[in-house]
Amino acid sequence: MSTETAETLPATRPAQPGGKSVLAADLRIVGDIRANGSVEILGVVDGTIESQGVIIGQDGQLKGRITAETVDIRGTTNGKISCKSLTLRSTSNVKTDVNYTTLIIESGATIEGKFTRAKG
């Protein structure tokens, strides 16, 4: 049993660096996701993702908005992406408006949308 009182305990936990969260292929999420680390989507997400990194797996689907440092897409996205580094793999199907700093597009990627490179 702890003898500490509420006065000696910290008011909030300090932010911890995040790990990797994997959303399985049989999972469907409607809503917003926030993570300190990276999020890998193998299932379906309808909503907003804010994290350090986002990976959309080959069978993964996202309808909504991504805000992240790095985004790697192998599956399907429909919505908006804001990131520093975007990689579109050969299996990706993207109908998205994108704000990015660096962009890699593999041969075979299907792309539709407005791509805007960030200034600076």
Image (cartoon, grey):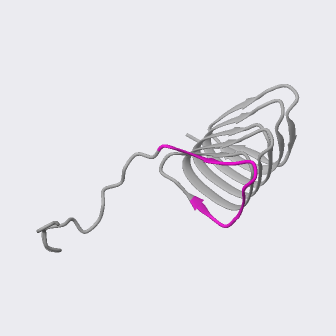
| The furthest residue to the front | 1
Number of marks present in the image shown? 0
| Residue 54 lies in quadrant | top right
Q: Residue at x 77, y 46 (%)?
A: 60
Q: Residue at x 45, y 46 (%)?
A: 18
Residue 75 covered by magenta stretch: no
From the viewer's perspective, tell me whether residue 61 is left or right of residue 17.
right
Residue 81 x %, y %? 69, 50
Q: Is residue 1 above or below residue 100?
A: below
Q: Quadrant of the N terminus?
A: bottom left
The correct choice, above or below, for 29 with respect to 112 in the image is below
Picture coordinates of residue 85, whole percent (x, y): 62, 37
Q: In which quadrant of the rendered view does residue 31 lie?
A: bottom right
Quadrant housing the C terminus: top right
Q: Nearer the viewer, residue 64 or 35?
A: 35
Q: Is residue 60 left or right of 14 when viewed as pictured?
A: right
Residue at screen point 13% across, 73% down:
5
Looking at the picture, how far across and down is residue 83, in whole percent?
61, 45
Q: Is 110 placed above or below 39 here?
A: above
20 or 92, which is in the foreground? 20
Describe residue 67's horizontal placement relative to residue 114 as left or right: left
Give the image location of residue 75, x and y in percent.
79, 42
Towards the viewer: 83 or 118: 83
Snapshot quadrant of residue 63: bottom right
Q: Tell which residue pokes out farthest to the top in this image.
A: 107
The magenta region covers 19-33
